[in-house]
Amino acid sequence: MSVKSFFRVRFYETDEMGVVHHSNYIRWFEVGRVDFLRSVGITLDELMNDGILFPITQVSAKYLLPAKFDDELELETIPVALTKFKMEFEYKVRRKGEEKILTEGFSQNVFTNMKTGKISALPEKFLSRLIQKSSEELQK
Amino acid sequence: MSVKSFFRVRFYETDEMGVVHHSNYIRWFEVGRVDFLRSVGITLDELMNDGILFPITQVSAKYLLPAKFDDELELETIPVALTKFKMEFEYKVRRKGEEKILTEGFSQNVFTNMKTGKISALPEKFLSRLIQKSSEELQK
Amino acid sequence: MSVKSFFRVRFYETDEMGVVHHSNYIRWFEVGRVDFLRSVGITLDELMNDGILFPITQVSAKYLLPAKFDDELELETIPVALTKFKMEFEYKVRRKGEEKILTEGFSQNVFTNMKTGKISALPEKFLSRLIQKSSEELQK
Amino acid sequence: MSVKSFFRVRFYETDEMGVVHHSNYIRWFEVGRVDFLRSVGITLDELMNDGILFPITQVSAKYLLPAKFDDELELETIPVALTKFKMEFEYKVRRKGEEKILTEGFSQNVFTNMKTGKISALPEKFLSRLIQKSSEELQK
């Protein structure tokens, strides 16, 4: 299963080339992750209140076609690995209702203990929510 | 006395109109405040470690002339009120070495207690550093 | 009449103090202006295609209470002057469904000719749309 | 050969986790590319005035260690492919004067014709400057 987020391109997200600045897709991917987690009943505040941080360890994007100011975009967030130690997602950005992909991306986050800063297993109560909504293949 | 900061306009700070997006000046003013405080021997980390926050309560800007990508800018940060309860600064942005002002601004920060969230007097050890570098007229 | 925009605070909009960085409100005000103009049938692209730019000349904000990550916000954009030469708006940011104001702001844009860079009267076809939706008092 | 850029982390570049938000590294890589091109005598304005755009087609980053507010950073920009059709760079971000890498990255830009939007060979006058400063191995 994947989760879709919808939003319009804001004017400040454009640059002098007249298109969306590429760094904004990296920010939108984060919006997609948050929406995915919300859809499985996890909020970042809840994680942080339990002493869990989830720093990003990798991100990448391929830019195929530009988005422009005021475009209505659809961001698809697809879990590709959800385990007690990490979350990996793929992303596809399209104009709303269109097939062609504008940008695709990938990210990896790990779970860490806020106090030690070390990688730390996600507590069962969160993990079960994460995995319940993802296919068996994802649990690597 | 005022403090000058120097930096180049970054590409991502431009927008579709081909000039610097106006929100970046507000961000640069913050760079100026940090440079001012550093010049009097105060770092934000030190304040935060002492339980002091310094939320911004007002900001304004007048945009006279646009700055462009790669421009070398000079930001002048001028204290207009430095007291135990608040810091007020004015800002002037010019191209390096030029007289004419591109943007001018104003900000007000108050000091608050991190735990209570209430306005709180700045401890003497910080206040003396702040005031030592400012003219008598500033101490209202 | 005023126009309301609704959106959630994104994680990247927070800063080390754990609240929304103040510069984002200035960016959101722009989102409000765009939504206001869309509501009266004007898109920025249409203006730009007609050779009209609308640089911002003033902006200000008063920060009363902080917004936090994931808050659902309501931005009210209130026209206070809409003429052939300028647009002035006031802004109020609240949590969705709450009365208390978190941040309030003001902006002024002028209309300029893309080629000359000079202030230039907004063509009648746009002005009539702007004014038709605003009260008589606004036409100064 | 590589080019180094030096800058401090700005407060607005931090997020609620108390470290630099990951999207800023992607923005800093752009600062590195611009500094590299300037070092070989090419400005983006000159390219754009000649009708050449240089959209980014890929970007990636690995985040190893966090940078914090006010850190003085050193960004190393290393060309890995500079041809008439594309530029590829690697990036390494360190604290100034330290060995350990905080973040490393990669980007690919292609040259396109502003009018047609198609990939287009970089004119000889620019290519010779690009290549003169890069090792033979880079010219693929």
Image (tube, coloured by chain):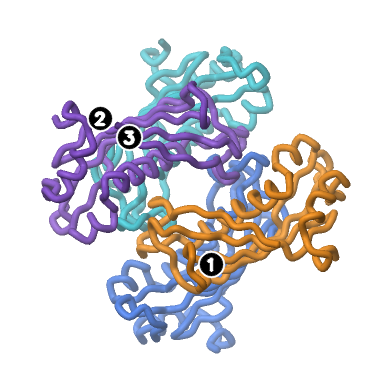
Chain colours: A purple, B blue, C orange, D cyan
Q: Tell me the element at label 2.
A: strand
Instruction: Identify the residue at image location x=52%, y=54%.
Output: C6
Residue C17 visible somewhere in the drawing: yes
Image location (x, y in percent) of residue A107:
30, 35
> Closer to the N terminus: mark 2 or mark 3?
3
* Residue on which disc 2 sits: A80
* Residue on which disc 1 sits: B3
For the residues carrying marks 1 and 3, which lies nearer the camera in this image? Answer: 3
Q: Tell me the element at label 3.
A: strand
Q: Determine the chain carrying the residue at label 1.
A: B
Image location (x, y in percent) of residue A135:
21, 30
Q: CA distance from mark 1 to mark 3?
A: 38 Å
User: Residue A59 bears which disc, if any?
Assistant: 3
The image shows residue D54, relative to residue C111, as above or below, that is above
- Left or right: residue A112 versus residue D89 is left
Image location (x, y in percent) of residue A13:
54, 42
* Residue type for callout 1: Val
Q: Nearer the viewer, residue C55 or C122?
A: C122
Is the Cβ of the residue at disc 1 closer than 8 Å to that at disc 3? no
Is the Cβ of the residue at disc 1 closer than 8 Å to that at disc 2? no
